[in-house]
Amino acid sequence: MSRSIRRRPLAFFMKIKLALLFSLASFLLLPTLVNGQVDRNALALTPPMGWNSWNKFQCHVTEDLVKSVADSIATNGMKDAGYQYVVIDDCWQVSRDLNGTIVADPKLFPSGIKALADYVHSKGLKFGIYSDAGSKTCGGRPASQGYEFQDAQTYASWGVDYLKYDWCNTGTRNAEEAYSTMNRALLATARPIVFSICEWGSFKPWLWANGIGNLWRTTGDIHDCWDCKTEYETGFVLLLDRNVGLESFAGPGHWNDPDMLEVGNGGMTTSEYRAHFSFWALLAAPLIAGNDVRTMSEDTRNILLNKEVIAVDQDSLGQQGRRIWKKDDLEVWSRSLSDGGRAVILLNRSKAASEIAVTWEQIGYPAHLDAKVRDLWAHRDLGIFHDRFSTKVDSHSVVMFRVLP
Ligand code: GLA
């Protein structure tokens, strides 16, 4: 009797201790685990930010390149500005071994992908990789069709945090099935791995990919130009047009992806790049830099590190902006922000400078309101404006500002 009296309080305290530990663990894991499973949407509550090798380096990827890029991101201000994922795109893989495990090019990645992921993690960054839902990647390397669960396990064992999954050589495969299969494979690893769907908008992923991927490409590949067109690639304002109407499909955890950034790759002027970056932020697009971040010009740095524009992209409301006015080559776009304000872009696509105006009514406020306007590129409060704001916008340029009543 006396023994059981002595024991009961001990068991009682043990239970309390366990309950506390359990609640603490559930609290810490809450953002990513639901019923013991990784919660897909919780992995990207704001659009992912990082760097990807493709736009600048295409197939010329090596472990030294990725390490030096991670070194730069960790020290050049990008990490502090929110760039987190360092992603190797196509051409890192050469074959499968006898067990079917994917093999990295031993000449280009002599230390192996796990060591590289460890290196990137040691810089306080996250590590991403690329594969494809078909028989071969777009670069002709072994892809993941039929190997989804094995590849996902391999990635998880290497410490991969982000997978970009392409759509070349998929034949008659159903896109929703293909991406759901890889999503299930990733979730089965229990490692939080952001899933980037790259099927170029072919089967309207915005209609089915919420809950499967964290971002989905809405278009074919970006080309480093304002509005040019090649067989497979298009300039950034044309990609912008193709995202009109898709606004309501994006939100925390699931984003429209108009492709990666070309800022700093040399095909556009500084003001065109400023426009490109402004729009990606207004569209709540993933901000995945695609330039050589080890050797950036001052102009490129000032664009990629503009914290006021990045804050628009990363706004917690997660509302994708929309075009609210267009007349010929002049446009006004706006996005609601969590503080009740708006981010606004005045866009001039024409060859000559032009005055563009926005009224407070156009952006959802009552007319005759007094509102503060702050220029996000000049980093300057422009004053309090009644009813509307109007300014001159240069050719192929934007003016981007926040409005706060
Ligand atoms: C496709 C994708 C690109 C890139 C290449 C790699 O074109 O859309 O972003 O990943 O494949 O081969």
Image: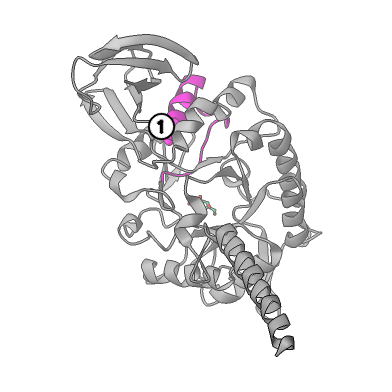
Q: Residues within 10 Å of mark 1 (few under 14, many from 20)?
A: many
Q: Residue at x 63, y 52 (%)?
A: 88
Q: Quadrant of the C terminus?
A: top left
**Residue 362 vertical position relative to residue 384 in the rendered view, above or below:** below
Magenta-span inclusion, residue 309? no
Of all residues, the one furthest to the front in this rendering is: 2
Report the span colored magenta. 257-281
Of all residues, the one furthest to the bottom in this rendering is: 1
**Residue 246 vertical position relative to residue 341 in the rendered view, above or below:** below
Magenta-span inclusion, residue 275? yes
- Residue 197 appears anywhere in the view: no
Residue 324: image quadrant is: top left
Q: In front here: 229 or 96?
A: 96
Q: What residue is disc 1 on?
A: 279
Q: In front here: 28 or 198?
A: 28
> Please, what is the three-letter code of the amino acid marked with disc 1?
Phe
Q: Quadrant of the N terminus?
A: bottom right
Q: Position of residue 250 (x, y in %)?
A: 36, 48
Q: Residue at x 70, y 30 (%)?
A: 295
- Residue 76 appears anywhere in the view: yes
Left-right relation of 262 to 75: left
Residue 400: image quadrant is: top left
Left-right relation of 140 to 121: left
Q: Position of residue 308 (x, y in %)?
A: 50, 26
Q: In front here: 114 or 167?
A: 114
Q: Position of residue 380 (x, y in %)?
A: 47, 12
Secondary structure, mark 1, is helix
Q: Residue at x 64, y 75 (%)?
A: 12
State whether label 1 is within 8 Å of ligand 1.
no
